[in-house]
Image: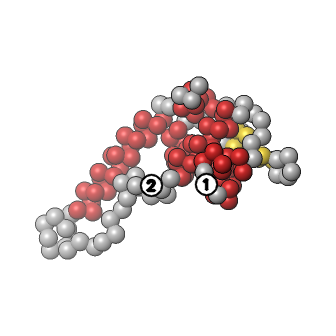
Amino acid sequence: MNNSRFAISLHILTLLEKAKGELMSSDYIAGSININPVLVRKELSNLRNHGFVESKEGKNGGSSLAKSADNICLDEVYSAVKQNNLLGVSKNTPNPQCPVGKQINKHLDNLYESTEKVLLKELSGKTLADFSRAFD
């Protein structure tokens, strides 16, 4: 499974959407997620690089959404934080003499690719605004 970056990023974006344009500090966000603020700043940097977040540095600084939550699709967020295939990768080299081993990686790759397409299709139909409404 992918690590928790998608969940952390979605938590951050939902908090920023609920803030309605007010700047939110990485310390506050970290307290909500219950993680180290350094990890929040790392994710904020990635989200900023993908155009989801804008930040102001300094004593009165913080972060806010860079665009409307209606214009942020969840598949875009997933793609911005994705590091591995959804179902992982095979780390071994199977026996090429085995009827299964010689083909398993090709069939796993096909399975992973089709599964990822289903996930992306599902996420593409939902915006951050849709997700955030569940918290009202």
The residue that mark 1 highlights is 35
Outermost residue on the right side: it is 59
Which of the two marks, 1 or 2, is nearer to us in this view? 1
In the rendered view, tell whether residue 52 sits above or below residue 4: above
* Image x and y of residue 77, in percent: 55, 44
Give amino acid for label 1: Ile
Can residue 51 be seen in this snapshot?
Answer: no
Category of crowding for the residue at label 1, using alpha-carbon neighbours closer than 10 angstroms: few (below 14), some (14–19), many (at least 20): few
Q: Is residue 33 left or right of residue 90?
A: right
Q: Residue at x 15, y 74 (%)?
A: 97
Q: Residue at x 36, y 62 (%)?
A: 89
Q: Residue at x 82, y 51 (%)?
A: 57
Q: Is residue 97 left or right of residue 91?
A: left
Which quadrant of the figure contains the N terminus? bottom left
* Image x and y of residue 103, in percent: 21, 63
Name the secondary structure under disc 1: loop
Category of crowding for the residue at label 2, using alpha-carbon neighbours closer than 10 angstroms: few (below 14), some (14–19), many (at least 20): few
Residues at badges 1 and 2 in contact (C-beta under 8 Å)?
Answer: no
Give amino acid for label 2: Asn
Can residue 2 be seen in this snapshot?
Answer: yes
Mark closer to the chain start, 1 or 2: 2
Give me the C-alpha separation between circle 1 and circle 2.
18 Å
Name the secondary structure under disc 2: loop
Q: Nearer the viewer, residue 11 or 100?
A: 11
Residue 131: which numbered mark, if any? none
* Image x and y of residue 59, in percent: 86, 51
Q: Is residue 74 left or right of residue 24?
A: left
Which quadrant of the figure contains the C terminus? top right
* Image x and y of residue 42, in percent: 65, 57
Q: Residue at x 65, y 38 (%)?
A: 15
The residue that mark 2 highlights is 2
